[in-house]
Image: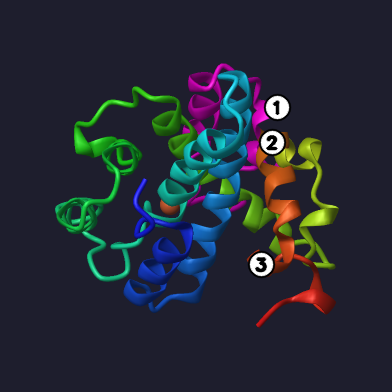
Amino acid sequence: MAGKFTRDCALALLQEWTASASLVKHGLAVEACTRAYGVLEASRLGLEGEAAGEFIELYALAGLLHDFDYDRHPSLEEHPFVGVKFLREHGWPEVVLHAILAHADYSGTPRETHLDKALFASDELAGFLTACTLVKPSRSIHDVEVTGVKKKMKDKAFARAVKREDITEGAALLGLTLEDHVGNCLKAMQENAVLLGLAGVALVQE
Ligand SMILES: [Fe+2]
């Protein structure tokens, strides 16, 4: 992969197009989750060294960039199509563009690759895990547990904008139980807690 299409370039693009700090954090949170799935899949495929690194980077790019056009182009007619057109014109990897299109139900692009499925599965769950963290007195994701997340998923009044069925469907697409999917994403976000501003009241990075 050419050096131009790095994680740093993707983050710069996300920041350039996004005024909302919480939307940038959402991109970073989804990146943490998709990257974790990239690591698992690379190891399942027996990839090592540079091949593994490049494979995992694609997962990170998809996570970071999946909503990068949303602040400027939030309508169903434009998101994520405007962003994907821009990325394609600049030569970003097609597998990443396919996953970004496939994360939107209405795009008509089917979820085919493992990356397509991982991005879709991570998107709503990352938002839900953030919501679960922000109601903790500590505001620390280290205090969030899988059982508590599952309980909150059944509470319709909590974070009602998050589509529960996308989370369960995403787990099924990946061939995982809901527990394992929540556990994977929770761990990935906990490992990036400071970056995501979810490390707790005393450790929020501004
Ligand atoms: Fe998203």
Cβ–Cβ under 8 Å for marks 2 and 1: yes
Q: Indicate the position of residue 109 as horizontal and vertical percent values.
A: 23, 31
Q: Residue at x 65, y 26 (%)?
A: 178
Mark 1 = which residue?
Answer: 180
Mark 2 = which residue?
Answer: 184
Q: Amino acid at mark 2?
A: Asn
* Helix, strand or loop at mark 1: helix
Q: Amino acid at mark 1?
A: Asp
| C-alpha distance separating marks 3 and 2 | 18 Å
| C-alpha distance separating marks 2 and 1 | 6 Å
Q: Which mark is residue 195?
A: 3
In the image, residue 167 lies in the stretch drawn in magenta: yes
**Residue 65: quadrant of the picture:** bottom left
Q: Residues within 10 Å of mark 3 (few under 14, many from 20)?
A: some
Left or right: 120 in relation to 71? right
Tell whether circle 3 marks a residue whose Cβ is less than 8 angstroms from ligand 1.
no
- Residue lying at the far top in this picture: please name it: 175
Which span is picked out in magenta?
A: 152-181
Quadrant holding the C terminus: bottom right
Identify the mark nearer the N-term, 3 or 1: 1
